[in-house]
Amino acid sequence: MNKMFQNISKNYEKAFRRFTKPTQNLLNTIIMVVLAYVIIQILSGADVLSYSFTNLLVGLCIYSIVAVGLNLCVGYLGELSLGHAAFMSVGAFSSAIFSNITAQAIPNSLLRFTLALIVGVFFSALFGFLIGIPVLRLNGDYLAIVTLAFGEIIKGLLNVFYIGMDKHGLHFAFIKDTTNTDAKGTMILNGAQGISGTEQISTFTIGVILLILVLLVVSFLVNSRSGRAIMAIRDNRIAAESVGINITKYKIIAFTISAAIAGVAGVLYSHYYTSLTATKFDYNTSILILVFVVLGGMANFRGSIIAAIVLTLLPEMLRSLSDYRMLFYAILLIAMMLLNWAPKAILFRQTMLPKIKAKLFKTRAKEE
Amino acid sequence: MSFISFLIAGISLGSIYAIMALGYTMVYGIAKMLNFAHGDVIMIGCYVVFYGVSGFGWNPIISTIVSVAVCTVLGVVIERVAYRPLRKAAPLAVLITAIGVSYLLENIALLAFGADSKSFTSVINLPSLSLAGGKLKISSVTIITIIACLIIMAGLMTFIKKTKPGQAMLAVSEDKDAAQLMGVNVNATISLTFAIGSGLAAIAGVLLCSQYHSLTPYTGALPGIKAFTAAVFGGIGSIPGAFIGGILLGIIEDLASAYISSQLSNAIVFGVLILVLLIKPTGILGKQIKEKV
């Protein structure tokens, strides 16, 4: 048995080495996700998992997906977006509206979900594109502030938007509910109350499949010619421009894809939680996603997934400390940046750390 | 008449934005960074005045002076601890740190003062002004806000044009390295900028809360972003620009909430930001800066 296992791992390693570094990285991440999925499925089959934990599973997928999306924007493009919650919101609302309108027309829920996914991703990508055009031509911190503003705009607009459906068709209204929907009809989007009653289609399996798809898309993008252009812009914009890279084009490509991925997470969200309100996707949610990316490591998709999972599960386990959670996130953001960038911290890493390591290893060697 | 009273309310709101925008625009001009925590410094300043007046029973003017002092120290400390070590780091790292500081201040306030809204009594207790036979009433807060804004603008412009430290600020904003070679103490100048900006933030905060009478840990966040929008609108880095941008944005916001929808006024204000960036990214008074390689 043991020998067989060794054989398998040896063969696996041999096969593994044939791939290039990025492919290995991608495979490792996907294997990690699949393994986690299989373990959780086995555990839930054995009825070991608590109800509150199984309830979190789709949430883990949602946050992992949006963290991967934001990492594409922050880690690879080097632009900060504080509006990824808003892109989630766009994806969630557009797909939920579509789903509710076609609830009777398309009885197959999986087909409806797939179409809703396309609708949600399309709209969040469209908004990403539209935001990107004026902002990504500029240098500086404009994207952060505009995406933050975009989040407020979307929240404000969705709070005063009404859609009703009855036998006369669809009715739209703005600011005041003047849809005059029949008593027999239903309000699909009811202003600040949002959308309720979307059929729960998202499952953990669908979430994991979407996460893997997203990982494939971003990994292929990052390791393609476009991906190298995007990273060149991040590392040195002027040098990249001087070798003929179209800066605005590649920035918009990366940002649009990043927004679309946030849309995927939004679609998953709106088809899992029964009530959907615009205030759920506020500035705090965007900061939370940013914390996942910063803690997991810039330009590291696997790190983002792990950070999203750990930081979603930890507060659930440590309920008593929930008051201090946000404080912890804030300190985490500052500390990570100072440790990575402050000259003194860099000096410490370069000079003292190897010495300490050497000392530690020496003492350990002596003990042995 | 109602239009004129909306307009005056807009100018008053705009004056508050203008004072806040000064903090953003000065820091952006000199340290080339977006100080996200500026809005939260405003909030801390409001809490100081609130507890000074209702907790310790101080005179409102003394509380305001204490609040200015606290905010000045806070601004300098934030710069020293969080931003100075990152002066040579990537802009993204500085921005994330600034967001972290802003989030930290909000959550400290949340833990220390609670999430409930405090009812802030106006520090200005003067009778309101009646014009046109009582048809047009202008509150004393509005008048004092506008006057305060004008005095601060004039004072700051004179400070920058006529004094040595002001000239040093200009020099650092033009070229940090060259200024250093000319004997300007860059670190002290940047500290001074943060000190002035944060001190003004306290005044803006007191005026803001006197106008709206409510105070929560998130009071500063949204007005802060709007003030930054005003700074971009007027041309970031330019002090008269901050004034013009602030006033215009205040008028737009007030008229939008009066004539379109109060729920949509934020969306409209931020829509203006996107339009400005689309049409004239350098703002009304901004200069086009060529980048050297």
Image (tube, coloured by chain):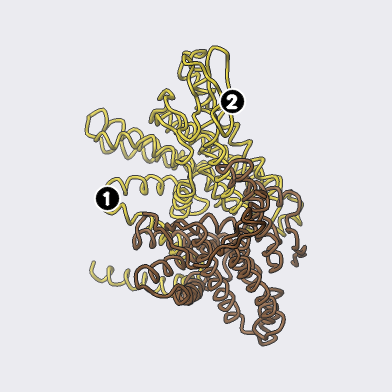
Chain colours: A yellow, B brown
**Between A81 and A278, the one nearer to me in the picture:** A278
Q: Quadrant of the N terminus of chain A?
A: top left
Q: Residue flagged by tag 2: what amino acid is it?
A: Phe
Please give the chain letter of the residue carrying mark 1.
A
**Between A217 and B221, the one nearer to me in the picture:** B221
Few, some or many residues within 10 Å of mark 2 (<14, 14–19, 20+): some
**Between A368 and B80, the one nearer to me in the picture:** B80
Q: Quadrant of the C terminus of chain A?
A: bottom left
Q: Is residue B17 above or below residue A99?
A: below
Disc 2, disc 1: CB below 8 Å? no
Q: Point out the frontmost of discs 2 and 1.
A: 2
Q: Is residue A100 above or below residue A80?
A: above
Instruction: Say which quarter of the image contains residue A175.
Output: top right
State the residue at coordinates (48%, 19%): A186
State the residue at coordinates (36%, 54%): B116
Describe the element under mark 1 as helix, strand or loop: loop
Q: Residue flagged by tag 1: what amino acid is it?
A: Leu
**Residue A146 visible somewhere in the drawing:** yes
Report x, y in % for residue A351: 45, 75
Label at residue A297: none
Task: Say if labels 2 and 1 share a chain.
Answer: yes
Report x, y in % for residue A48: 22, 34
- Count of labels in the image: 2
Q: Which residue is mark 1?
A: A318
Report x, y in % for residue B247: 67, 59
**Residue B77 visible somewhere in the drawing:** no
Q: Which residue is mark 2?
A: A172
State the residue at coordinates (50%, 57%): B212
